[in-house]
Image (spheres, grey):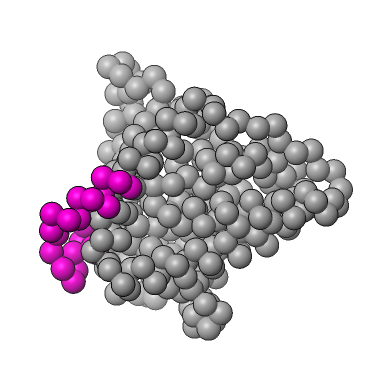
């Protein structure tokens, strides 16, 4: 029974991760840290041997992530269109609900010291800076129209996917925002809705390459100096609250409903943590 609950937790984490990575401004990496699987995932995909050793964990997580991507392409996009403030506030609740867990993991080996403020502030500034650029539509590009196999576009998708995939597992950085910067976001979302495999297959290849490469780098950094890495992660996570703060936020009825959704998000994050307990 304990094993079933453990894998259910991994599936739910994958579901939230996949959902978050499709939504501009929301970081899938943040959700990994919030739900306490960041270390586990980055270590599990840091090499071919590690992947085989953690096959069932990765399979369950990937199943949830795939479901989350499809779900967000159809359902979450509709929620954002009709209940934007409430949906954003729910994700803010998820993030805030996981902050104590992030602190706990970061200080397992060493206590917080003054120098931790440096990576924290820098990381938070990066997220806020990217958010400002996103709101200004500085990098908005026209999407590609793909109706058949095109070698140049396929190579472009592989490269862009690899770059975006690295950011997908970095807390605070929105993978979908990076796809917007690279001009492939609308192409990918349209391909998922239309089941256009001329786009989906090369993008998936690039994503696998980027996630494995990025995970190996992050895993190495955590082993070298976990406290400083988690200080930066905390900055990225806190900064992401500003990144997904909804337009129209203020003293109004919609924001009141939003706070209720945020509370529900905090409760959901706490529940997922309790399902699996602490990561080892």
* Residue 193, quarter of the rendered image: top right
Q: Residue at x 49, y 32 (%)?
A: 134
Q: Position of residue 152 (x, y in %)?
A: 80, 51
Total numbered labels placed on residues in the image? 0
Q: Is residue 13 left or right of residue 200?
A: left
* Residue 162, quarter of the rendered image: bottom right
Q: Residue at x 39, y 76 (%)?
A: 3
Q: Is residue 206 left or right of residue 258?
A: right
Q: Nearer the viewer, residue 93 or 4?
A: 93
Q: Position of residue 108 (x, y in %)?
A: 19, 69
Q: Nearer the viewer, residue 140 or 33?
A: 140
Q: Position of residue 269 (x, y in %)?
A: 32, 51
Magenta stretch encompasses residue 169 = no
Q: Residue at x 32, y 73 (%)?
A: 223
Q: Nearer the viewer, residue 200 or 75?
A: 200
* Picture quarter with the C terminus: bottom left
Q: Is the stretch drawn in magenta largely helix, strand or loop?
A: helix
Residue 5 in sight from this viewpoint: no
Q: Which residues are magenta?
A: 98-123
Q: Nearer the viewer, residue 126 or 28?
A: 126
Q: Position of residue 89 (x, y in %)?
A: 36, 34
């Amino acid at each position: 029974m304990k094993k079933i609950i453990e894998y259910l937790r991994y599936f739910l984490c994958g579901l939230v991760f996949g959902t978050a990575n499709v939504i501009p401004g929301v970081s899938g990496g943040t959700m990994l840290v919030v739900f306490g699987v960041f270390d586990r995932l980055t270590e599990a995909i840091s090499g071919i041997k590690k992947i085989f050793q953690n096959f069932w964990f990765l399979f369950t997580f990937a199943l949830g992530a795939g479901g989350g991507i499809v779900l967000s392409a159809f359902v979450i996009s509709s929620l954002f269109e009709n209940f934007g403030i409430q949906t954003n506030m729910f994700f803010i609740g998820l993030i805030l609900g996981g902050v104590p867990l992030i602190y706990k993991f970061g200080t397992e080996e060493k206590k917080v010291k003054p120098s931790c403020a440096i990576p924290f502030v820098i990381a938070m500034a990066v997220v806020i800076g990217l958010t400002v650029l996103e709101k200004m539509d500085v990098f908005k590009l026209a999407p590609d129209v793909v109706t058949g196999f095109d070698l140049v576009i396929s190579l472009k998708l592989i490269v862009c996917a690899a770059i975006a995939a690295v950011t997908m597992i970095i807390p605070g950085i929105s993978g979908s925002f990076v796809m917007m910067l690279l001009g492939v976001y609308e192409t990918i979302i349209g391909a998922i809705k239309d089941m256009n495999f001329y786009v989906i297959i090369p993008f998936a290849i690039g994503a696998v390459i980027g996630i494995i490469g990025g995970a190996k780098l992050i895993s190495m950094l955590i082993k070298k100096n976990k406290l400083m890495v988690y200080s930066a992660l905390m900055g990225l996570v806190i900064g992401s609250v500003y990144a997904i703060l909804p337009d129209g936020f203020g003293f109004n009825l919609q924001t009141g409903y939003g706070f209720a959704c945020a509370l529900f998000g905090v409760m959901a994050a706490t529940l997922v943590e309790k399902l699996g307990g602490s990561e080892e």
